[in-house]
Image (spheres, rainbow, N blue to C red):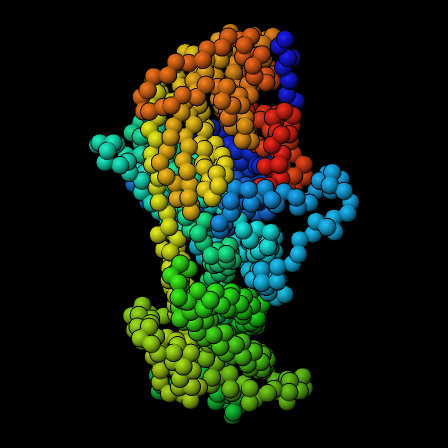
Amino acid sequence: MVAAPVELGLIDESRLEPRLHGGIVTYNPTIELFAGAAGPTTLQIWRSGNQVVAKNSQRGERASVQAVHWKADGQFLAVGWSDGVVRLMGLETSKAVHQMSVCDAAQSSITCIGWAQNLAGKHPASAAAAQSSFIKTWEQLAQQGLDISKKKPAADLPRELTFLEIETALPKLSPLPASGGSGDDTFVFTTRASLEFLFRPFSQEDSDKVDVMIVGTNDGQIHISIYDSFVIGSFRYSLPPSFGQQAGLQLCETASHLELSTHTLVFKPSSGEKSKTLYLVPIDLTFIHSSPENLSLIASKTTTLQKLLRYAKQVQVHMLHEWQSTRELPGRFLNSINQTLREAETYGELNIGQAMYHSVVTGHTFPEVKEWLVDQLAERGHKRWDKAVVTGLHALRALVHENFLPVLERISIILSRLLGIARFHESKAEIGFTSAQIMEVMDIVSCLMLVGNKILLFVMEELDLFQAFSIWLRHEIDRLASSSVTEELTEKEASLEHGKILAYIQQYMPASPLRHYLSSVKAEDGERDRKLADGGSSLLELLEKQIKKQESGQPETGSYPQVEFLAKYLESQASSVLEGIAEAERRSVRFGQVTKVVLDHDVSRFDVRLSATQEGDTSRGITYTAITTEDNEPQVYIFRTSTTITNGISSSVTAALSRLILGDGKILDLKFLYEDSLLVLLAPKTPSATQHLQLIRIPHKSNDLGYQPYTAGAQIAPHRLDNEQVAGVFLNMTIPCPPGFVPTQMEVKEASAERGKLPPRLCLLGDDMQTYKVFELPEDPVGLALRGRQQKANQ
């Protein structure tokens, strides 16, 4: 007896404007959002109900969207652009919060983005299953009983101390002004929501997990990064010599499993859009399997360090901008009167500073200065001068106090954690950095903190002196413009602080001491001083010597007190540490044995899924690759490739094939869902108003599918099923759609309870590239039997 098909319920239907570019669209795994290329140059995010949440496009040359992929927890969206950069958009902000340069846009383009999660360290396949007893939801609580005291694990004190988050005790970083920044991070740190999203505290629950992103290009390169933005490096895969002279390859899909550090890469020839050949290549990320227990701590801290360095760079840019704004307008005013005095040729080398000093001391004002004060500067010019200086100095003080010094404190704390790790692993090369390197970086941070405090002191002093000077300047304008001395002017003159006025005219007006810290550094000067610092001299001692020379009035030419020099030096030395870590991980990446898949016709659609089993002390990774071709029959090829993985290294691969012909319909697409379900989307042979789209669930792991050993090019007879057999053997689901709707691609998402309960979902994009439908898949029997895996992945 043939069971009645299950009719899927429609969750959402959207009409997208403009048309999607290249069919690039993906649904968020944990929340009702989906993202796609709204035209070639715009990335757009929609909420259910066709509501636009965010738009993003690149400034300058109009880069186009080439690939998109959500992170497993739905917090980030990775977008590959035609300029060769992958930008990560945060869920809480439409800004690109991270960016990674993957390839040279003139030579190659991004073809694929994969983003997965692995357990770090030597975890057998059953380790994660042991965590499934941990209670996370009320449904589980009800099933296991209300008394959870017996299930509470004992505290692991060393582990608790290792992952103790000291940063959470510090005040939160303050947002930066919306204007005045530079580069791609101009607006990233300008809102509280963006900062809180970027600097979320590291969760101890994630301490044994590693997020891995693999980006592929059309020239055979793959780019690997972990923890959102920590770049491991790029690798180029080439076929073994035994395959003969081969064309270039491009990555087109990846597959991974939570418990395996070995991933599966799917390549195709890069020449042409269509191909009859695919290559399945294991890639062993052994640094995940054999890493020290604190890999997640190192990676999370270094990732946070990168973000703090980006924040510090933007703060430095803002500081220089604000200081320059305090000097620009007054400088124009002073240059104007200095030129007038020179042209008068009456007072020799007299400048405006000397003339003002003369006026304060004697009460006499030179005629040219009087004319300048009364007719040119006047009340309006004074107000502009006062506003430019006071506003700029207040902003500079706030930047140093609220942004610059706090970010340096956070950097110091992270460096102290890394220093402890380096000292613990000093005899090993596996972590990629030494305590000496960290001490050098900490020395630079100490210099920046010293300079920051010096700037703060000088800003406070300059503000105090300028306020006295500004009151006197306004008094002089009013006095000189008045035909007689009034009682009010006399009272104001009595309250003037002449000592501060003279100090400002002498020390700050011609050249502020802040110039020693906030000026631009010539490239040759910076290079000279850096070589001296790299030669082994203590940077802090060199800085203190130079500051003493400045304060004693001695001539100096060094760059050490300049924020620009120190910030660039910090970035360079920190990059060396980060590169050392990445190099240590790159040495642990290897490619396994390739499996060549050769078909009779060009590949139409395919999907890949990686499963894991435990066999004693070794793991077995089993990759299922489902393919449909461009022939006239509804034919599905399911390739099963298996490899033994010992200590994170894959061995030889065995391959088998099951070949099915599913009735007389037309296969539109196919996708894996969970670990035991292959969903095949079928359209009726002759479209009609009474026949709906059909979704078939194939249990691809079942031995009943008749897997046979496979070698490249081997001919294996198909299992042919008629329509009635398809309906009787497999779970059938119908998709209610109007006759004019023809799906061009399908995406499936597993059930999620990350941000509220979401069922398994089927997402269909129409061939008009505008109609987007989301249907609810049944929990049973598709997902109920495997809910344990979903719970395990959420632990």
Quarter of the figure that contains the N terminus: top right
Query: Is 213 rendered above or below residue 450?
Result: above
Percent position of residue 570, x then y: 42, 67
Is residue 192 or residue 434 the one in the foreground?
434
Q: Position of residue 649 (x, y in %)?
A: 39, 44
Q: Residue at x 42, y 69 (%)?
A: 435
Q: Residue furthest left?
A: 245
Q: In the displayed structure, does residue 233 sit left or right of residue 665?
A: left
Dividing the picture into quadrants, the one containing residue 577 is bottom left
Of the pair 650 and 473, the residue shown nearer to us: 650
Q: Is residue 187 above or below residue 542?
A: above
Residue at 37%, 50% (x, y): give it: 588
Residue that sits furthest to the bottom in the current view: 362
- Tell me, yes or no, if residue 135 can be seen here: yes
The picture places residue 169, in percent across and down from the top left corner, at 63, 65
Q: Nearer the viewer, residue 614 or 134?
A: 614
x and y percent of residue 302 in the render? Answer: 47, 59
Residue at 31 percent of width and 30 percent of height: 269
State which quarter of the image contains the C terminus: top right
